[in-house]
Image (spheres, rainbow, N blue to C red):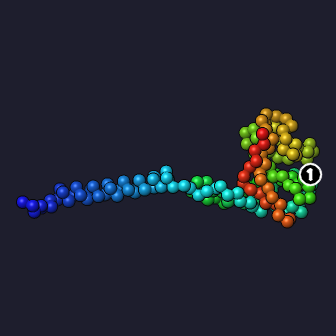
Amino acid sequence: MDNQVTTRRTFYGVVINGLMGLITAAIAVPAVAYLFLKPKSGGKTSFVDAADVTQLKIGKPEEVTYRRTRVDGWRVMNEKTTAWVVKTGEDKVVAFAPGCTHLACAYHYEAASNQFVCPCHASTFAIDGKVTGGPAPRPLDRFVTRVDGSKLLISSQIERSV
């Protein structure tokens, strides 16, 4: 009586249970990896070559376009971005984030009034980033910068003004 005969029904039951186990594993393994494995760290501050400091004029803001690599969780993106750069001395440069501090609208520089203007909600900023008018709650956000020889290096890290 110990001799078991495999019937078609028991064979199909084993196959179906095996397939369900494989499907469960295929769903569970990525879910566990997502929940318990740490994503790529964006903790390191990396600087990107954005402009030639010798080409900038002291006190005259200039919009600089450059490429940077951004890590978002497990995704690494190479993107084109901008910053408003103001040379304040021979080797001192300030780079402002391109979004207004009110609702992150893109602003521009008006040479006639020597200020940054957000056309959406009429916020205005001095060339040092301080609010001079409008609903903006704080000065323009600044990127962490470094000058290396004649190169302006800009980090993706922002120094928020209070």
The three-letter amino acid code for the residue at tag 1 is: Gly
**Residue lying at the far top of the rendered structure:** 135
Between 160 and 109, the one nearer to me in the picture: 160
Residue that appears at 70% across and 57% down: 45
**The quadrant where residue 41 appears:** bottom right
Residue that appears at 82% across and 34% down: 134
| The C terminus: image quadrant | top right
Between 42 and 79, the one nearer to me in the picture: 42
**Left or right of residue 113, residue 49 in this image:** left
According to the image, label 1 marks what residue?
59
Q: Is residue 106 at all visible to an observer of this figure? A: no
Q: Secondary structure at mark 1?
A: loop
Residue that appears at 76% across and 47% down: 159
Q: Percent position (x, y) of residue 137?
A: 77, 35
Q: Percent position (x, y) of residue 131?
A: 84, 38
Between 18 and 106, the one nearer to me in the picture: 18
Q: Is residue 109 at all visible to an observer of this figure? A: yes
Crowd tier of the residue under label 1, counting other residues whose Cα lies within 10 Å: few below 14, some 14–19, many 20 or above: some
| The N terminus: image quadrant | bottom left
**Left or right of residue 155, residue 149 in this image:** right
Q: Percent position (x, y) of residue 59?
A: 92, 51
**The quadrant where residue 124 appears:** top right
Q: Percent position (x, y) of residue 8?
A: 17, 59
**Residue lying at the far bottom of the rendered structure:** 149
Residue that appears at 67% across and 58% down: 44
